[in-house]
Amino acid sequence: MGQLLQPVERRKLRSLISLQYCLIFMANGAMFPFFNLYLRKILSWSGTRIGWVMASSSVVIMLSQPLWGRISDASEKHKVLAFALAVGACLVFIQPLVAGSFLVFLLVRLLHSIFTGSTASMFDAIALDVLGKDKDTYGRYRLWGSLGFAVAALFMGKVYEVIGFSYMFFVNAALIGTASYVAFNLDGASSNSGQDPDKTASAELKKVLANPALLVLLGGIFLVQTANSAGETFLGVYLDAIGGSSAMIGSAFAMMAFVEIPIFLAAPRIVEWFGYKRVLVASTALFGLKLVLNALFPIPWLVLLLQPMAGIGFALFQVSAVLMVDALVPRQFRSTGQAVLATTSWSLAGIAGNLLSGTLLDTAGILTAFGIGGCVGLLGTLFIHCFVPRKAERAPVVDLKT
């Protein structure tokens, strides 16, 4: 197959990209908003235990994510993704069956994190390969993930009130299994990657991270996401604590995701107008500000009104961060670059955020946890504004050969 895909095949691949985003994030929307509430109310876990378990999951994701990125870069990406999704579907299916034993549940949960924690970043790299020179249209395809998440969160929140939270695992497994099948049919996705001719150059992770601008960027993102990831993880617990229902929890996440859709559509133009850095600063400021407002005004209906801030912030953050990192790493190591971004923004930040928020939940209360988290997020925004260079420059490939 030549460097350029035929128009019909290109359209097919891009349609599958949209479908895959929808499936992956629909599975996430059917489970993520309600998982910690399941641990809190059904399994009667403390906030500290939830925080430690979630942090442990983030640790194994952090350790495995760069390895998945390297394997994906060196292999047929779609087959690696299909395998990871298939194993993840099996592991999530058995979790409610072993929930009676904490140690067994924890082991299965950690194994599940190893196989599913890197799938989003691997698929981002595949999507960028398919889009090639049109990578700035990334948001138009990623919005299907927001749509899938919104529909699942809104619908399943009401369903779980009737049938019980344990069914979230089976719904997630079915959707992830379907996503595995779609991934296997993405044959040819890497043929339009636009990679540099020298594909045999070996690069260690430390050389991928040789660009100082990338390191500074990742530092700011870590601070921002320490707050934001914990805020999202404990939003269900927060709403339950202030009197919100399970349906309201689903509605809150759905409202956030629905708002993301038009923002993802507009994101390429917004980034073109203002540049990566300004968009990143504005989006991260919304994260911290929303958490501070949640802490100051614990009113269920106000939570729903504030959720669009998170949706706008996430869509602009996702597009600007993914494209900025892509501009700062060599093209042939896109998967590794996106894995490093995901490791920093969700794994490392998730470890810090979950431990901090889980402990504060038990010792100072959920409102204090959200207030402190919001301040940490705003500190990260200030760091990005002050220290991240405005112009993103790719690390030269020649540096990777030495």
Image (cartoon, rainbow, N blue to C red):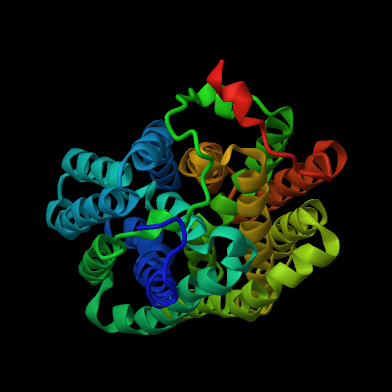
**Is residue 202 found left or right of 183 in the rendered image?**
right
Expressed as whole percent of the image width and height from the top left, the position of residue 390 reads: 84, 45
**Is residue 392 found left or right of 37 in the rendered image?**
right
- The quadrant holding residue 175 is bottom left
- The quadrant holding residue 213 is top right
**Which of the two residues, 240 or 378, is positioned nearer the viewer here?**
378
Q: What's the residue at 71%, 52% (across, down)? A: 374
**Which of the two residues, 354 or 20, is positioned nearer the viewer here?**
20
Does any portion of residue 378 appear in the rendered image? yes
Expressed as whole percent of the image width and height from the top left, the position of residue 296 reads: 74, 62
**Is residue 382 found left or right of 198 in the rendered image?**
right
Considering only vertical position in the picture, is 192 above or below 175? above
Most distant residue in the right direction: 386
Q: What's the residue at 34%, 37% (across, down)? A: 71
Most distant residue in the top direction: 402
**Which of the two residues, 145 or 128, is positioned nearer the viewer here?**
128
Expressed as whole percent of the image width and height from the top left, the position of residue 330 reads: 58, 37
Q: What's the residue at 63%, 72% (across, down)? A: 264
**Which of the two residues, 197 or 98, is positioned nearer the viewer here?**
197
Considering only vertical position in the picture, is 265 above or below 40? below
Expressed as whole percent of the image width and height from the top left, the position of residue 371 reads: 70, 52
**Where does the C terminus fall, quadrant-wise?**
top right
Considering only vertical position in the picture, is 283 above or below 328? below
**Is residue 175 found left or right of 100 in the rendered image?**
right
Q: What's the residue at 28%, 41% (across, down)? A: 110
Considering only vertical position in the picture, is 290 above or below 81? below
Q: How many marks?
A: 0
**Where does the N terminus fall, quadrant-wise?**
bottom left
- The quadrant holding residue 149 is bottom left
Does any portion of residue 299 appear in the rendered image? no
